[in-house]
Image (cartoon, grey):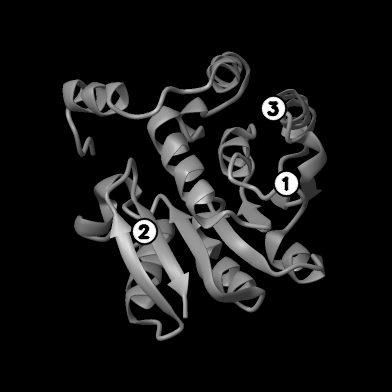
Amino acid sequence: MHFLSDTLHSYIKQHSEEEPKLLKELTRETHLKVIQPRMITGHFQGRVLSLLSKITAPKTILEIGTYTGYSAICLAEGLQKKGQLHTIDVNEELYNMQRTYFDKSGFGKQITQHLGDAVTIIPEIDATFDLVFIDAEKTQYDAYFEAVIKKCRSGSVILSDNVLWSGKVIEPLQKSDKATEVLLKYNKKLKEDPRVETVLLPIRDGLTLCRVL
């Protein structure tokens, strides 16, 4: 489902911050070399993530779902000088590509890559998270959320991507569609969870912003 026309989307990009040259290069390489390049965060949402990070000025960021590293670089733009970003992914084939662009970005020393299951890795990270970005296996969203909220403080921000799931959340649910079923429950939970205050933003494929109380 296309929420906005191509013309309107183009207008939005034209009136938002420019996409950094390095991220344009990363987008091009992702489309040339990586399966499912549409998964990359992209210009507009990337600038949203960057600005949210700059507003919150986090000391520690956690990202679940690295892909080729685009969103991690956007989030790192708001890190404090001695801040740290931890990013977790299961695809070891993308590890070197991520590292190449992290180092080119100037944030390389502040970004730590983790390979494996996020639910297992998160408790092992010795940090309190000021900003979290969840963008990995949709059927695990609830498990990710429960793992991270235990390591957040009051005022921490948790972002969840793809929560509109190409509009499937408002279509008749197919019995075989586990991802949509999980996201429907997840969206309802975030709205009702007394531990957070929540706004679902119609940005790209849906981005939920939660502030920990």
Q: Quadrant of the N terminus?
A: top left
Q: Is residue 76 above or below residue 100?
A: below
The residue carrying mark 3 is: 105
Three-letter amino acid code at the position of disc 1: Lys
For the point 64% across and 48% down, the residue is: 79
Q: Is residue 46 left or right of residue 4?
A: right
Q: Is residue 200 above or below residue 194?
A: above
Give the quadrant of residue 5: top left
Q: Residues within 10 Å of mark 3 (few under 14, many from 20)?
A: some
For the point 51% across and 32% down, the residue is: 40
Q: Is residue 141 left or right of residue 151?
A: left
Q: Is residue 166 left or right of residue 48?
A: left
For the point 77% across and 50% down, the residue is: 82
The residue carrying mark 1 is: 81
Three-letter amino acid code at the position of disc 2: Thr
Q: Position of residue 71 (x, y in %)?
A: 56, 39
